[in-house]
Image (cartoon, coloured by chain):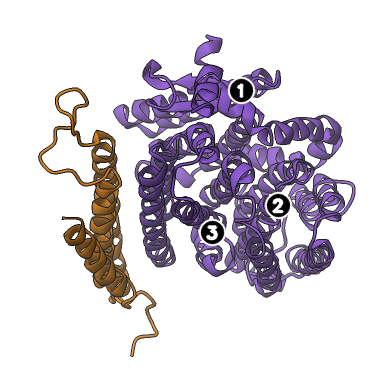
Amino acid sequence: MEALLAIAIGVLTTCGVFLILRARTFPVLLGLTLLSYAVNLFLFASGRVQLDAPPLIQAAAVYTDPLPQALVLTAIVIGFGMTAYLAMLALRGLSESGSDHVDPGREP
Amino acid sequence: MTAHAPILPILIPFAAALLQMVCGRLAWQRLIGLLAAALLLLVTAWLAQLADDGQVRVYALGNWPAPFGIVLVVDRLAAAMTLLTAVLGLASLLYASAGFDERGLHFHPLFQLQLFGLCGAFLTGDLFNLFVFFEVMLLASYTLLAHGGGLARTRAGISYVVLNLIGSAIFLIALGLLYGTLGTLNLADLAHRLTLTGHDQALARLAFALLVTVFVLKAGLLPLSFWLPHTYTAAGAPVAALFVIMTKVGIVALLRVQATALLPTMPDLLDYWLTTLALATIAFAALGVLAATRLRALAAWLTLLSAGTLLLTPAQGNAAVDTAAIYYLVQSTLAGAALFLLAGAIAEQRGRAADHLMAGQPLSSTWLKVAFLVLATTLAGLPPFSGFVGKLMMLSTLREVSAGTAIWVALLAAGFVVMIALARDGCYLIWKHQAKAETSAAPLIGWQRKTAILLLVAAGPLLSLLARPLADYAGEAASQLHAPGAYVRAVLGTAAVEQGATP
């Protein structure tokens, strides 16, 4: 389980960083989305991975830490809002300059 | 009432933003905004006075005790920073009320939300809450940056947003690592648990390194500072004036984390690299100051220069240096913001030349020229204004540290470069005119903008006049910052700290 989660976070981060380094805003946006998925999974894992355990302390001997879940929820909401704003800004840049290159005027 | 004082600087702008969103008329929004900003100023001044008794005030949100709930912590540094935010907010808002707020929708609620985020970031004692307030502040700043429209702002906005989103991702990774290793995100609790054994030292160190990276990204340390000059140049004058304090949020957060958590347990984390990079930032910003072709760009590079100067201080971990840093921070923030506002007013007076450093229409009003002269003297660090006092304090305290000679050379050389650049730019703005035939009547500067500019420009002479009491306050704030034991005990309670230390 841990290995699977670690591999998933690693692959998402790699793809995210690769896409962020592209020169057009759309891949950058996708890259940021993937990176935020990776970060959310990472935060989730910071409370240790527990299978079949309730997020309550007294209900069972083994329990899941509920705090990272709350943190992830906050991070998802914030990341979602930010990404939506960036998408609008990128669209505005595209309509104003006619190009979605991050550095217009230097396109190959 | 006194018990609830710590939350007021957060509640006032938030309530004002909600009210402004309900009544959509601009005249009402202006009135509410200005009233709220004035109220914020009064409340933060009161808070700064309350904090001056040396007690660390802890406000538990929802009355949940510290390691479990989120706390706001008010000490002298936090109170002084919220007061600075309120002064800057009032001046910028006054300037914006003269017509800048008509150029787009929702300026006023966003401005209040930005103040909300700034005050929250200075007051919070919990790292995840700090992340949330950073995001509130950033989201408002993204939209304020784009306020007024134009391609330059959109382009600057895209790189600014992308960079800060990556910064947020790194911040979250750092928080995840901290929670995974130490099991808490409360700063006082983190500092306490770091002193105990039983956690992975290397992982905690890595987490703090990532956290410091995010703070220096906000502050504009060299490899991460290329976004700053063109973003601040592109922003409208009152927005840029408020943005000046955003670089300071990173520095204050860094000072606090360094003094509270890092110095007792891993004092060598900032050694070697931070001072070197800060010196490089100073050199880079000084070159930028010389190369700037617009007054606004000059103001942006000067902001970077003051950030670089301030970043020299966290690595020293020394209360005397931090005293100088706090005084320098206050005066450089006010002077930098004043230059942004002044550049906006001057640009309108000079016809097509705007704030480009070339011959334009002559400035008709004498007070603008005098204001520029006073401000330039302050910014260049020449006597008798506050820039000189700030620089003197920095130089005299930084003499004894290990890289003292290099710091002296860099600061003095940068001061010289700034003086040359400001003298050159003053010549262009005041004495170099176009042929008379092309000139047209310059628009009048309304009382709002005049008051805002004069308020911030007057800070130079005023802070110099009040240097002794302010330096005393800064000194007490720094020694309070460097007594992390009192901070931890105030947040967690004396019993919990001693109980945790025994097993």
Which mark sits nearer the N-terminus, 3 or 1? 1
Secondary structure beneath dot 1 equals: loop
Q: Are marks 3 and 1 in contact (CB under 8 Å)?
A: no
Identify the residue position indicated by label 3 in the image: B232
Q: Is residue B136 above or below residue B498?
A: below
The amino acid marked with disc number 3 is Tyr
Secondary structure beneath dot 2 equals: loop
Image chain in purple? B
Identify the residue position indicated by label 2 in the image: B313
The answer to whether one can see residue B38 in this image is no
Rendering coords of residue B382 (x, y %): 86, 54
Rendering coords of residue B466 (x, y %): 83, 32
Q: Quadrant of residue B284?
A: bottom right
Q: Which mark is residue B56?
A: 1
Which mark sits nearer the N-terminus, 2 or 3? 3
Which hue belongs to chain A?
Answer: orange
The amino acid marked with disc number 2 is Thr
Badge 3: chain ID: B
Rendering coords of residue A81 (x, y %): 26, 48
**Left or right position of B94 against A57:** right
Give the label, 3 or 1, closer to the camera: 1
Q: Is residue B475 above or below residue B168?
A: above
Badge 2: chain ID: B
